[in-house]
Amino acid sequence: MPIPKRAGELAAEFRIAGVLDFAESAAGLVRATVSLGAMTGELYLQGAQVTGWTPPGARPVIFTSPNSGFAPGKAIRGGIPIIFPWFGANGKFPAASQHGFARAAAWSLDEVTQGDGALTLRLSLAGDGDPFWPVPFRASFEVSFGATLAVRLGVQNLSPQAIEFEEALHTYFAVADVRAAAVTGLAGCEFIDKTDAMRRKRQPDAALVLTGETDSVYFNTPGRAVIADPGWRRRISIDKEGAGSTVVWNPWAEKAAAMADLGADAWLGMLCVESGNIAENAVRLAADSEHAMTTVIAVAAEA
């Protein structure tokens, strides 16, 4: 696996004056910072993790915890972590890291392009040596920062036989108050309630308003979910393709207080609505094939 490049090396290769630059956290994690007109964005190369996006004239849309350590090998709390190749705990190997290895891996920045009012970063991750998933593969991640935020995760199977994996774009959305926010687009869908002994339930037709700790995995969901954020008078639309599952998560007060990288009050300002392929929606990919899922996030004002 290639040695990760430092901020100075990446700046020499990819920097665009006034648009794209690179810096490092106190612990040495490299991040790309984007400024295009009135839009700003941020991405850490560890995990290829988007940690910020603010479209023109709007409040931040992506939540990232100020208490996250931003340290090598440690998952960043917030943004859009890439979950791969398993979701949650690894059922076969209890010692394996939660949510797979991709979100703490060193991804390579391969290409930067600018056009149509957006800046696009393309990154990749290749491997076959993980002790809990020794499969030859290549993952690609593409993010376009603009008036919308568009992300694409691709996985190519380089092995001679079919493989199976789970994946998710674990998006943390910033909201004025999670207790007032509402999620639509999941009506009638079956889900597993991980806060209620993994019981299988069906979502009512009414909008989903969280009233306590929520950790629900929905299956065979439609291509669009919408977050109504009345405190900030806006609607956040999440359009997905190639992703059969949707996850809704918030730890609520008691659990958040016990999470050092989140903090006692941060849960009020965040709501995770994640696109992915989990459990019965897991991807089975033939040899020498590629699967991709995409998510496009947009914001509209609401009177």
Image (cartoon, rainbow, N blue to C red):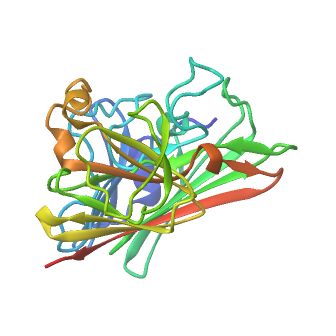
The residue located at (69%, 31%) in the rendering is: 133
Q: Is residue 120 visible?
A: no
Of the pair 134 and 194, the residue shown nearer to us: 194
Q: Residue at x 55, y 34 (%)?
A: 100
* Side of 198 relative to 33 (left or right): right
- What residue sits 41% from the left and 69% below the top? 119
Q: Nearer the viewer, residue 151 or 168?
A: 168
Query: In the orientation shown, which residue stands out farthest toward the bottom?
Result: 116
Q: Is residue 136 above or below residue 281?
A: above
Classify residue 21 as left or right of residue 97: left
Rendering quarter of residue 260: top left
Q: Where in the figure is residue 253, as x and y percent of width and height?
A: 19, 33
Q: Residue furthest right?
A: 160
Whether residue 5 is situated above or below residue 117 in the rendered picture? above
Q: Residue at x 42, y 63 (%)?
A: 187
Is 235 above or below relative to 31?
Answer: below
Where residue 8 sits in the image (x, y, percent)? 39, 46
Q: Quadrant of the N terminus?
A: top right
Between 200 and 20, the one nearer to me in the picture: 200
Asked if residue 98 lies left or right of residue 50, the reply is right
Indicate the position of residue 61 as horizontal and vertical percent values.
26, 60
